Image (cartoon, helix red, strand yellow):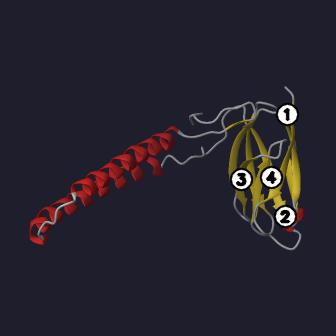
Amino acid sequence: MARVGLRSNLVVLHFGTVQVVAGAVFAVLAVAFASVFVVVAVKSRDDIPYERVQGPGYWLRKRWLALLTVVIVCVLGVTFFELPYPSSAASGTVVVKVTGGQFFWSLVPDRVRAGTPVRFDVTSVDVNHGFGIYDPHGRFIGSVQAMPGYHNKLDLTLNEPGRYMIRCMEFCGLNHATMEGSFTVVRR
């Protein structure tokens, strides 16, 4: 897993290389596509008979469809098997087991040292919950679903010591608004 992305003294966001490349290719194709529309709009001042446009239009449409099909198949082929989360935690990563229930969060362990990569392994014992984590200043830094029978992962590196709040991000019952927990990051 490549560590490309936003780096501050608070949090390191992990992005895979394939996702960064796919985003760059999408941006280039979007600009090229928009440029074609601008050129066509500028050059379409004169009326042209339908028959004169029909033949080249069908020729272009077939090739455009073939190009889009090839691009979509290539992008899916490259990114489908390279999901954004690795299947196992990297060495040195602390795995925090998170269990949500109406209306509590249980985290084991409930503290790590600053700068340590953390994998939150999140599940639920009853209904769906949204595991949302906020830094010591109240800024939202990550979220993943907590679902009964499933284990979803959230990888973060928390560099700032302090108390990180955990809040439920999905309505889960009458006391949803009171469903909070905390996680502590201590100095190295």
Q: Which residue is mark 3?
A: 143
Q: CA distance from mark 1 to mark 4?
A: 20 Å
- Residue 62 in the image: state x and y as whole percent: 20, 62
Q: Nearer the viewer, residue 48 or 137?
A: 48
- Residue type, mark 4 in image: Val
Crowd band around label 1 with a 10 angstrom C-alpha radius: few (<14), some (14–19), many (20+): some
Q: Which residue is mark 1?
A: 161
SS type, badge 4 = strand
- Residue type, mark 3 in image: Ser
Q: Earlier in the sequence, mark 1 or mark 4?
A: 4
- Residue 182 in the image: state x and y as whole percent: 88, 48
- Residue type, mark 2 in image: Gly
Which residue is depicted at the point 44% across and 41% down?
24
Q: Earlier in the sequence, mark 3 or mark 4?
A: 4
Q: Residue furthest front?
A: 45
Q: Please say whether residue 135 is visible from this viewpoint.
A: yes
Q: Which residue is mark 4?
A: 98
SS type, badge 3 = strand
Q: Nearer the viewer, residue 46 or 172?
A: 46
Q: CA distance from mark 2 to mark 3?
A: 16 Å
